[in-house]
Amino acid sequence: MTMHILTGGEVTTGRRKPSDLVAEYESKVAAIPEALAAFQAAQDAVKTAATIGGTWGNYTLEAGRLDERDIERSLLRSAWRHTYGLYALENFASAADKKRLEQMFCDPPPFTVENIREKFGAYIMDPRGSILKGLAEQFAGLDPAFASHEKMKVGVKGLPKRVILPGFSEYSSCYGAERVRDILNALAAYQGKPLINHRELAALMRDGDALIEDGNVPADRYNEAVEVVGRGVWLRRFKNGRGHLFFGPEALRDINRALAEFYGDVLPDAAEERPAAPRAGTAVSKDLQYYPTPVAVVERVLADLYIKEGERVLEPSCGCGRFLDALRRRGARPFGVEYDPGRAAQCRSRGHSVLTANFLETEPAPDFDRVVMNPPFYGRHYARHVEHALRFLKPGGALTAILPATARYDHGLLSGRWSDLPVGAFSESGTNINTTVLTMWRGDA
């Protein structure tokens, strides 16, 4: 599908642009009363045709009934579904996004150019990015290796050649089949292959080798013959209700390349190929990258915290102060530390108390009820920040830190309660690094 950008940033498929679709929709909404009047006139004509001299024959003719609201609802749903199909968004949207869109289609918002851009713009403007994100969403939860940035460089060896999936028992096989379908569709979108259809999926459930290569699955007593597209995968099902989905060399290579492209071949939180010369532990590296915490992430993290009125909360490396703003709205007394003078001044301009300093050089005092932080992602630098921040907590105080997924799955430097954030949670801040939230407590000792 060819797409290009129109003047003013509007996207078209080369056939119809969003404003044309909205114009057709609005004209049809305006024409509903006339169409209903014509329908009513046709009903009257049919009834008249069944009478002589207008005399009722004591026989009720059911000519049907239409309501203006029902027509408007049908038209609205049709407009959204037509646009979804017109731009072939099924090929770009992730499995999770497809479910969200199906829910949206049941009760869609007004059909406007602005709403089309809001709901579909990411897929239309960046179809490849949407495909990569969908694949990352599928694989990040299958095996820690697929969530690790250090293991997702281009050409990395030792990737898992299989994933183990639940849902293949006699009573839950549909769930297992759906998981396989979503994985294979995410890979197919990247490879430019057609999405798997229900007949191919059924063939795989019957014969685990059915999709290794292009071919034909012969008919049997209960099923017709099926032409299949080779996916380079095979499935083994076991009596314990689990299924093992294996990836051949080509499929595994494409998974590696796609995830490496999404995460970035060399990331700020990846181990260095050649260790740099030693530097002072408190030195602020020029390599540290500033990833402001997206507002949606701030709200998600704080939603899991019970913050009491008047609690003192420390945010080390507070950046532009998004956590400070949200903490204050919840009644806390936040205090920030920020190395960059410009960002520190930005926070102070909104009434926050912020110390301009390298956090690792600040003198700890156990005065805070909580620490909420998004420390630098570089290498294993985050661990020093977390360990230093713990020393600012009162006994029993809690620390919540947003960290790269490698902190959980690879490094093993910190322990506590972990909760992964969604894939692409920091995309708007310029990185696709997988992230996780660590919660720790300071003991009484």
Image (cartoon, grey):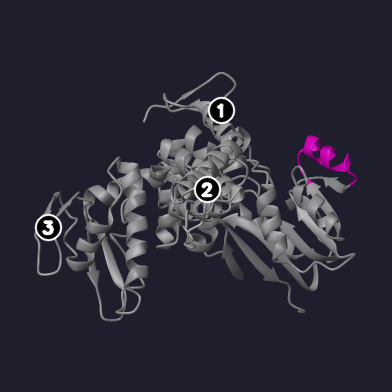
- Badge 3: few (under 14), some or many (20 or more) residues near its Cα, within 10 Å? few
- Badge 2: few (under 14), some or many (20 or more) residues near its Cα, within 10 Å? few
Residue 403: x percent and y percent? Answer: 60, 56
Q: Quadrant of the C terminus?
A: bottom right
Determine which of the numbered discs, if any, sits on residue 19 in the image.
1
Whether residue 50 sits left or right of residue 221 in the image: it is: right
Q: What stretch is highlighted in magenta?
A: 338-351
Tell me if residue 143 comes above or below residue 357 in the rendering: below
Determine which of the numbered discs, if any, sits on residue 74 in the image.
2
**3D distance between C-alphas at marks 2 and 3:** 37 Å
Determine which of the numbered discs, if any, sits on residue 283 in the image.
none
Q: Are marks 2 and 3 in contact (CB under 8 Å)?
A: no
Instruction: Please tell me whether mark 1 sits on a helix, a strand or a loop.
Output: helix
Q: Which residue is the site of mark 3?
A: 225
Amino acid on which the number 1 mark rests in the picture: Ser
Amino acid on which the number 3 mark rests in the picture: Ala
Q: Which of 240 and 316 is in front in this view?
A: 240
**Residue at coordinates 73% horizontally, 65% vertically from top-left?**
390
Residue 65: x percent and y percent? Answer: 53, 54
